[in-house]
Amino acid sequence: MIRKARLKLLAKAGFLLFSGKQAADAFPFSFELFFLQNGQDGVNRLFPGNNEKAERWGTMALLRKKRIFYILIGFTFMLCIYAIRVVWIQIHSAKMAISASGMTINELAVRQREEGIVLDPGRGQFLDRHGSPLTGRAVWVPVLFPVKELPDAVQLNAIAALLGVSAAELEGRWSKLQYPYIWADGEGRALAVSGDEAGKWMEISGFEILPYMQRYSESDSGKQWLGYVAQRPDFIRSLSGRSNGRSLPLTMQVGASGLERTFDMFLRGVGSTRAAFSVDGQKRPLFELGTRLTSANDRYYPLSVRTTIDGTIQHQLEDLSEQMGIREGAIVVLDAAKGDVVAMVSRPFFNPQKIDLEQGNWSNHAVKAAVPGSIFKTVIAAAALEEGLATATEKFHCTGHYGKYGLSCWKEGGHGTITLEQAYAQSCNIVFAALGERLTAASIQRTADKLGVGRLVGWHDPSFLDGAGLRQMDQEEAGTVFAMGTRPDGGARAQTALGQRDVMLSPLQAANMVVTLLHDGKVMAPRLVQDIYFKNGTRMLQLPPRSAPSAYGAVSPTTAKMLRSWMKEVVQRGTGQSLQSARWHLAGKSGTSQVSPAGRAANHQWFIGYGPVEEPLYAVAVLVEKRPIGAPHQATELFRHVMDILAARIHE
C-alpha cells in the first residue's frame, strides 16, 4: 500500500510538472511501472475528473511498452540467428572447403598450428595392360620445414653433404623458408635419396626424408597420349555442382591433355596424404608431438585406370626412335585382333613436368593429320575395285610422265606396261593418277569413310555416363580427303589419288585402316583404356572393344583380301623389299609425300603394314616427318625394326 501510494504521488507530480511527452520522458520508469501495476483504470483514478489527460498519459505508456517489446523481439531474433549460424558452422560449414586450396574451417584451424607438405595428392594412377604402373613412383626425398632455430653446425654440415651443397647455401635457403620445401637438384627435379637414409635423420628438427609420390618419370618420353596435369581454376569452377557435392580446391592439379584429361573425372581422388609437424606461435617445433601423417584412407579411392599399352614395348620403341634419330613423327602399334593401341610414340618427346605450350612438344603426332602420300593409294585401289572401274589384272602404261597437271612418276623412265596389282606394289603414280580421274570425288570420299579415313575413329561411347559422351583419344584429328566447299575436277582427283593436295590422315587412322583390311572391312575403334579398378582391386568399369562403322557400309571382304595380298607383293617384289630381312614375313605399303614446312621443301615418309603374314598379330604405321628431299626412306627401316621388336616380345 505504501509503495502504491508513492508511485501514485510520483506519477501525479510528474504529470503536474510536465505535460504530454515531457512527462513520459521525465518519469518513464514510474509511469510505466504504475501503468503496468494499475492499468488504465488506475490512471483514471489518479486523475479524477480529468479523463482526457489520463487517457493521453496511458496511451503514451502503452506505446513505450510496445517499443520495448519490439526491441526485445529483435534482440531475441538476432540471438537465434547467431545460434543457428554457430550450429551450422559446427555441423556443415566446418566440413566444407572455404579456401582456394580446398581446406575446411577445421583444417585451417589445425594448420595454423602446424607446418606440412603434400606427399601424395591422391590422384588415381595409370597401368599398362599387364598391370605395371605407367604413372606414380614412390621416391624418398629430403624435406625442409621452416623453423625459427636451425640445427647446429655439425648437423647442418651433415645435411648439406647429403644434399650436395655447402652449409652456407643450405643455411641461407633454409632460414628464408616460409613453407615446407622438397629439396630439388640443379634442374629443378626432386632430389631422390635412398630409403635407408630416412631413419638416420629423425632427431634433427625441421628436416625429414619422406616417401613422395612422383607422378611422371624425370626423363622425356613419347607418351603424349598419356598427357599431363596442371592447375586449371576455370575448369574447377565449371565443375561446381557436378562434383558429387564435394568442393574441389582451385589449386588442384587436373588433367590438361591426353588420358589425364579424358579420364580426369575418375582420377581426382578423395584426398591427399600430408606430412606435418606441430609448431607454437613463434614457429618453434613441438618435438613431443612428432611428424603427423594424414590421408583420406578411403577403401575404394584412388582408382586405377588400366590401359591397352604394353609398357615394355612402349619403352623399347621410344628408345628405338631415339637411336634412329627421328626428330618428328610417330609410331602406332595396334593389336590386330581388337584394334587396341599396344604402343604409341610421338616425336619430339616431351616432359610432362615441364610443359611449354608454345613449343608444342606436348602435341601427339600419332593422332594429328598429315599428308599421307602413296599410302592413300590403298583407298584409291579399294574405290576402283568397289566401283568396278578396274581389275587387279588390268594393264596400264607408265612412261614416267602423266602428260598433264604436271604429274610424274617417281621412277625415271616409268614402269612401262604394268598391271594394277603391280602398280600398287611399285607405287606407280601414273596408274593411280589415271584411276583418280576415273573415280568421282563422291566415290573416293565414300570409300575413305568406309576405311576409317577422313573421320574420327578412336574409341567413342556417345552415352558413356549420365548421357555424356566419352572419346578416349584426346587431340584426335579427323583429317580430310577433299577441302570443304570444293568441286574437285580431274586434276584435283588425280593429285588426291597420290595422297597429295587436300588429303590428310593420322598415323592412328593409317594403322587402323590396316586393321580394317585384316577384319575384312570392319572398322574397329582403337582403345587406349580397357577398364578401371577400385583401390581394393575390384573392377569398377569395363570399356569393351567397339567398332566404328561407316554410314556408307563397309568395303567387301573380297576387296579387303585382295588389298592384303597386294601388300604382300609390296614386300616381295615392290618398294618394301628391304623388309625381307625382318624376323617375320611382313606386308605393307610405303608412302612419300611432298610438304613445305616454313616454305622449305621436304618429304613425309610413311610405311604401314602388318605381321606376321601367316597369322597377323599387329598392324603398324610409322611416320617420319620433314625428311630432306632425296633422303633414304627411313620409315621403311623404322617399320622393320618395330616389327623385329614385336617379334622378339612375342617369343620371349
Image (cartoon, grey):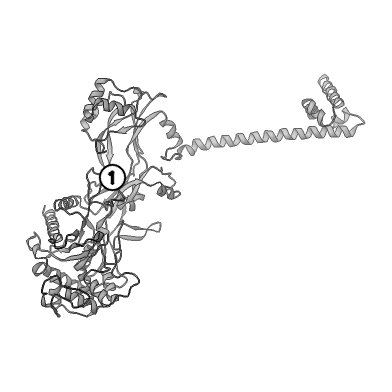
Toward the viewer: 115 or 303?
115
Label 1: element kind: loop
Check the image and report above or below for 2 versus 277: above
Identify residue type, mark 1. Answer: Lys
Where residue 614 appears, as percent x and y from the top left, is: 12, 65
Q: Quadrant of residue 576?
A: bottom left
User: Considering the image in quadrants, where does the N terminus appear?
Assistant: top right
* Up-down relation of residue 272 to residue 244 (above or below): above
Where residue 220 sits in the image (x, y, percent)? 22, 47
Q: Position of residue 504 (x, y in %)?
A: 26, 65
In this view, 289 is above or below 488: above
Give the residue at mark 1: 354
> What is the residue that sits farthest to the top in this orientation?
2
Q: Is residue 556 visible?
A: no
Spot occupied by residue 332 in the image (x, y as percentages of width and height): 21, 58
Closer to the camera in the image, 177 or 70:
177
Q: Residue furthest left?
A: 581
Q: Is residue 253 visible?
A: yes
Q: Residue at x 83, y 20 (%)?
A: 6
* Of residues 365 and 226, the one drawn nearer to the viewer in this rendering: 365
Q: Quadrant of residue 643 in the image?
A: bottom left
